[in-house]
Amino acid sequence: MSRTLDLPHHANLWDTQAAPTIVMTQRGARQGFQAHLRSRGVEVVEFDFLTPECVADYCYERGFLQVFWECGGTLAAPAISSGVVHKVLAFVAPKIIGGARAPTPVGELGNVEMSQAVNLLESEWALT
């Protein structure tokens, strides 16, 4: 899922012999790059307005029972806020970095108090 398709030209993800890959994007984004992906066997799906809800609805209509979204905070926040995430696997480094521009697993959710934090159900953790 990428609105701008600001993605690498060469990536293991584009090797569809190992597993199929679907890229979902905003209509009209980087047409030449879309052609490159399609020539590699990647399925490219364009949306008039790309949102996590649209992607979830599309996947449901295709009959997908599970979808794995590997993403950073910019996509995680709207996906969680919209209610399309039902399970979270988070890998967090054992360091705390503060600051408004610090990279975190989830971007801005609009919470200002700890009481507004998203509660995780059935959570597990392990030290490795």
Image (tube, rainbow, N blue to C red):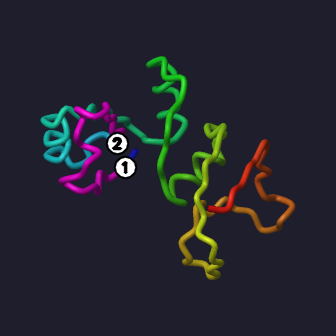
| Residue wearing tag 2 | 25
Q: Residue at x 56, y 77 (%)?
A: 102
Q: Is residue 126 above or below residue 12?
A: below
Magenta stretch: dominant SS?
loop
Image location (x, y in percent) of residue 85: 62, 40
Give residue 18's quadrant in the image. top left
Secondary element at image label 2: strand
| Residue wearing tag 1 | 3
User: Crowding near pointer 1: few (<14 within 10 Å), some, many (20+)?
Assistant: some
Q: How many discs appear?
A: 2
Q: Residue at x 54, y 23 (%)?
A: 65
Rendered image: mark on residue 26: none
The kind of residue on which mark 1 rests is Arg
Q: Which region of the structure is painted magenta?
A: 2-25
Outermost residue toward the right in this view? 115
Closest to the observer, 128 or 58: 128
The kind of residue on which mark 2 rests is Thr
